[in-house]
């Protein structure tokens, strides 16, 4: 079996398993289980990020960053579920301010070191880049109106989001591998092509309409125009998210964030595009569609 085909099959197997976990929590209606999956992915990805930096000789405050992420994720989930207007956002700002205070305090007790500003900056960036952005998945869950029995309905918007995002990733990979000829951003990722970018947009747009056809009654906030805008917008954001992680990995001089997922790499490699598409969908639903306002 050729290396390319083996990589594709390994990636497909890993994706099927992860999709199975997602579908089980969505259709099971278990909010805590859904959040546990989100939190586990975010914490694992953040740990991989800090580990990449440390392997490259960049000292960061890993323990402080991980503890801050736990507080940010758990507190954000509880605040969003409480239904208080702006509750999650207000809590997150409090966490960020206290985290900055903790980082400066931690640096004072560590000593001057070789580059204290670099250590603090990379640690704070990790908190904002991974758990804060990924936490928008939780906000989407509780943004949509609840059912009469109080059950949340936003899980299906998250399912829509993941499908569109991953179809964008798949389209970029397949079309780029088969037809890619013209380099897209060679200074960031030499293998990315314009053909792959077009494939990402086409398949994300397809997934947008496909998911709506499957879950029409579960996605009442969407209309035809929204499916087009979100299909293309989320597809573009997914490409940017993938390239953003490439910038991070290039800076850390590594190819994959880890090797925990066959054919994919690490957890950060799995969720990188969602880090940008989740906030986009949340803000579109809230400020364009008026959901939850």
Image (cartoon, rainbow, N blue to C red):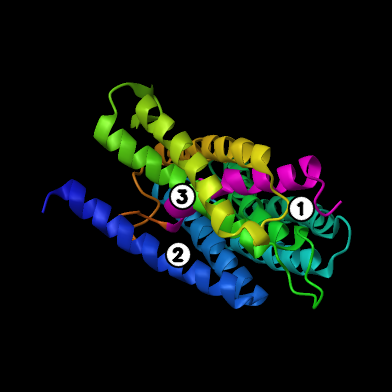
Residue in the image at 42% along x and 44% along y: 169
Q: Which mark is residue 229?
A: none
Q: Which residues are magenta?
A: 267-293
| Picture quadrant where residue 140 is located | bottom right
The answer for how far apart the CA atoms under marks 2 and 3 are is: 10 Å
Give coordinates of residue 244: x percent, y percent. 50, 37
N-terminal of the pair, mark 1 or mark 2, is 2
Can you identify the residue that label 1 sits on? 101
| Distance Cα–Cα, label 1 vs label 3 | 37 Å
Q: Is residue 23 above or below residue 275?
A: below
- Identify the residue under disc 3: 166
Task: Decide if residue 114 is on the left or right side of residue 51.
Answer: right
Question: Which of pointers 1 and 3 lies earlier in the amino acid sequence?
Answer: 1
* First reached walking from the N terminus: tag 2 or tag 3: 2
The image shows residue 89, relative to residue 183, as above or below, that is below
Q: Which residue is mark 2?
A: 19
Q: Secondary structure at mark 2?
A: helix
Residue 228 percent location from the top left of the image: 60, 37
């Amino acid at each position: 079996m050729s290396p390319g085909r083996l990589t594709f099959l390994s990636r497909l197997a890993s994706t099927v398993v992860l999709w199975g976990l997602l579908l089980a929590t969505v259709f099971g209606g278990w909010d805590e289980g859904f959040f546990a999956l989100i939190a586990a992915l975010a914490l694992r990805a953040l740990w991989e990020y800090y580990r990449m930096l440390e392997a490259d000789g960049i000292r960061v405050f890993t323990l402080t960053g991980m503890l801050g992420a736990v507080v940010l994720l758990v507190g954000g989930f509880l605040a969003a579920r409480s239904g208080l207007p702006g509750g999650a956002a207000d809590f997150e700002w409090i966490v960020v301010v206290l985290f900055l205070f903790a980082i400066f305090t931690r640096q004072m007790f560590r000593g001057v070191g070789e580059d204290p500003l670099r250590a603090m900056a990379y640690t704070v960036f990790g908190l904002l880049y991974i758990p804060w952005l990924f936490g928008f998945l939780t906000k989407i869950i509780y943004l949509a109106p609840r059912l009469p029995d109080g059950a949340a309905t936003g899980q299906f918007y998250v399912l829509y989001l993941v499908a569109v995002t991953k179809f964008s990733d798949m389209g970029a990979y397949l079309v780029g591998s088969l037809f890619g000829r013209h380099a897209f951003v060679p200074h960031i990722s030499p293998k990315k092509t314009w053909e792959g970018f077009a494939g990402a947009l086409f398949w994300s747009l397809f997934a947008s309409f496909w998911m709506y056809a499957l879950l029409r009654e579960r996605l009442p906030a969407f209309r035809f125009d929204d499916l087009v805008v979100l299909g293309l917008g989320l597809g573009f954001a997914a490409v940017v998210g993938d390239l953003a992680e490439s910038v991070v990995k290039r800076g850390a001089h590594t190819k994959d964030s880890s090797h925990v997922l066959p054919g994919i790499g690490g957890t950060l490699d799995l969720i990188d595009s969602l880090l940008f598409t989740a906030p986009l969908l949340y803000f579109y639903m809230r400020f364009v569609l008026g959901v939850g306002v």
